[in-house]
Image: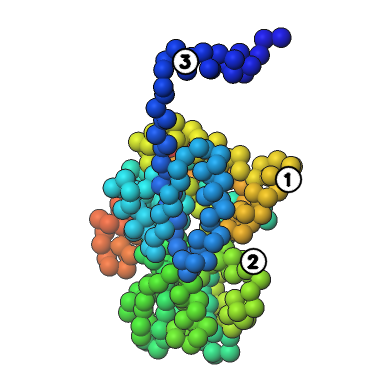
Amino acid sequence: MFNRRLVAAALAPLVLLACGPQKPAEQKVLRFSILSTESSANQSEKWQPFLDDMAKETGLKVEPFYASNYTSLIEAMRFKQSDAGWFSNQSGMEAVRRGGGEVFAKSTHPGGKEGYNALIITKRGSGVTLDKLLACGKRYSFGMGDAKSTSGTLAPLTYLFGPRDIDPQACFSNLRSAKHEANLLSVANGLLDAATYNTNDVERMQRRHDPKADAVLEQIEVLWTSPKLPEDPIVWRKDLDPEIKAKLKSFLLGYGVGDDADAERERKILTDLNFGVFQAAGDDHLIPVREMEAAANLLEAQRKGDAAAAEAARKAMSELSARRGGAL
């Protein structure tokens, strides 16, 4: 039976002799960006096994690019300091708009459920309630997420503050923007009265099986839970080398898939990152987030009495509704 692999193996030495000494091909580099949602030590420890597998399976030299905020991730992609990475939905939307990015995959939840929720938390026993918080009067301090965070900023603006015509800047005595972990610790330690958080990060904390992390979670209670939000996109540069694209996509979509010991080990690594297996996706993954953004823009325009901006937001909402299910 004809076996191409055996023939290729047999001919390889002859080809090398005919061509003379061969210069080793330069290893291609993939710079993979990751948002530092917690301390850099914890982040690196959990991501490194995944990155090591990526390098091994793709044959690429994988260089992680950790950033403490979404804007840094977007700008890194825009200026080709990163090639691909894990984004939130809102920051992924900006990476597509102005960073030359393109959605090619999406994360899933380890338990198989669809989506996650934004939260507003307070210190257990503080006496702060949602009604008291929304009464404003600059009585309470409040922490929001990065300006490009879906759960930390866009979701509460769209589903909670906007419909009630509440401007957080005017509502709270002190409004600050920080990473999710920083907001959680500030609330637990009584430095903030309330802050945004999300169910995915709660589960990441719980999976540490760390008594200190468990003690922090025991100190908080949830005041508000958003509607379901779509899981996070994985974005690469549109102009990325097609060979690197093919290798990265093959790796991600095959990672943790199967019933053998390797797949089980890979799923454990993904679970530690609070991911299930990755699924193929396109820019249409961002349609629900763009609809949220348009709704928030409409509420803001109505609050300011800006008829032109309100009409633009309505038009965007109508166009997105018509294109739901198709590529943007």
Percent position of residue 117, x then y = 55, 63
Sort mark 3 into few (<14), some (14-19) or many (20+) by Cα contacts within 10 Å.
Answer: few
Residue type pointed to by label 2: Arg
- Closer to the eye: label 3 or 2: 3
Q: Nearer the viewer, residue 111 or 284?
A: 111
Eyeballing the image, is 135 above or below 157?
Answer: below
Percent position of residue 275, x then y = 59, 54
Quadrant of the image occupied by residue 139: bottom left
Which quadrant is the C terminus positioned in? top left
Residue type pointed to by label 1: Ala
Percent position of residue 21, x then y = 41, 22
Q: Which residue is mark 1?
A: 261
Residue type pointed to by label 3: Leu
* Number of numbered discs visible in the structure rendering: 3
| SS for dot 3 | helix
Judged from this view, the residue extending furthest toward the top is 1
